[in-house]
Image (tube, grey):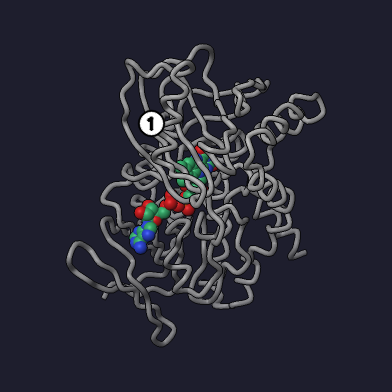
Amino acid sequence: MESYDVAIVGAGLAGLQCARLLATQGVKVVLIDRKATLDQKIHTTGIFVRRTLVDFDFPDDCLGPPVKHVTLYSPARRALEIVSAHDEFRLGRMGQLYQHYLSQCVAAGVHWMPETSYLGYSEIDGKLTISLSTGSSVHSITTRYLIAADGARSRVARDLKLDLNREWIVGAECVFTGAVIEGPPRLLCFLDPKLAPGYIAWIAHDGEETHLGVGGYPERFNPAAALSKFQAGVADIVDLQQAKQIERRGGYIPVGGVLRNIANTHGLLIGDAAGAVSPLTAGGLDACMRLSAFAAKVVVEYLSSGNPQILRSYSGELFRSKFASRLWARRVASTLCQRQLLELTCAVMRLPLLNRVVRHVFFGRGSFPDVLNVASETSR
Ligand SMILES: Cc1cc2nc3c(=O)[nH]c(=O)nc-3n(C[C@H](O)[C@H](O)[C@H](O)COP(=O)(O)OP(=O)(O)OC[C@H]3O[C@@H](n4cnc5c(N)ncnc54)[C@H](O)[C@@H]3O)c2cc1C
């Protein structure tokens, strides 16, 4: 039976970032995903914010042109335009980016197991035996440590008896090339309690790719029906006549804030499995990069020392306080389910003082806390 230091389940951005960083430090890593190739069934629009683009080095050919214009529409389609002095967002070419990171993982020595599903694990004499299925065959590997990067509804987190996400929104989108929108590249956000209850519908257009999507609380809407209705309703804004639909994406987004109990001596959680998503904006890509980097550091220290105290620094409690205002804003957003109330909120947001709040939400630099710094501050 093949034996590893670390088994990572899930090769989304969180798993890839963690695998790459562990392997470059000499850790023997296996990366497992049920997908055959990483450009299938992508769970993200791929909007990277400025802070992530500044702090991490993404290959330029995996990113679209910069976006600095945002339009926020009220339910009655009154527009609030904001423009940043900076390039605020770039749409990742996610399939390409995942493949790029996977090549780096493999070059660093990661053993890649595609088309392989995690089934469960058992512990014997301090070693974990992981049960996997590839096609119709069931087989096992052993590992010293298990990392859950298997997304919002993590089976690995449940098996590790760590915390589980309990509050979600669901997103669904279509990706087009050849769509036409007047003006410069922009992010258009639509507040509409029917099409996107508790969240937004969006058009992210960088001049090359155009993503049309809806998100909201799953018990309050049908995402597929809302997406069709949204697409038909924005024909005056986006011309899709010559456009080609190249993908359909979607998935669950945890919005209850980073979980508290995210590590024990068998394993830990990263990315969506750890609830590492901004409860207000539902952005999780920045969190994937930062929390996975911190996880890699903690795991290297833990494996080399065997000291379980080291794992105490990997606790959601350390970062949760940084989420307080966004959790509060999520509570408010989830209750804004009446059209008139949302219209009024949008009217108020056009006032200069609150306009600043809107700018802060879209252009602020406070996505996920800088976990490496938070952890070292608290250990002092
Ligand atoms: C529609 C949508 C749009 C979004 N847009 C944005 C955005 O524009 N910007 C932003 O910052 N955030 C966005 N988010 C949030 C962000 O995309 C996620 O936080 C982030 O992608 C999570 O990455 P991850 O690696 O944790 O999980 P995932 O990307 O979900 O990866 C999990 C992986 O685990 C694999 N897996 C699961 N179970 C098993 C198993 N049992 N065995 C083997 N493999 C398994 C899956 O195949 C998958 O590859 C969006 C989310 C959604 C759903």
Locate residue 262: give its quadrant.
bottom right
Residue 16 makes an appearance in the image: no
> Mark 1 falls on what kind of element?
strand
- Of residue 74 and residue 238, the one placed in the foreground of this image is 74
> Taking 32 as reference, is 105 above or below it?
above
x 58%, y 41%: residue: 199
Residue 262 makes an appearance in the image: yes
Q: Is residue 170 left or right of residue 81?
A: left
- 10 Å crowding of disc 1: few (<14), some (14-19), many (20+): many
Q: State the residue lying farthest toward the top.
A: 182
Quadrant, the C terminus:
bottom right
x 39%, y 86%: residue: 124
Residue 129 on image: x %, y %: 35, 77
Dot 1 corresponds to which residue?
175
Label 1, ligand 1: CB separation under 8 Å: no
> Taking 207 as reference, is 92 above or below it?
below
Residue 277 on image: x %, y %: 58, 50
Q: Amino acid at mark 1?
A: Val
Q: Is residue 12 left or right of residue 264?
A: left
x 28%, y 72%: residue: 2
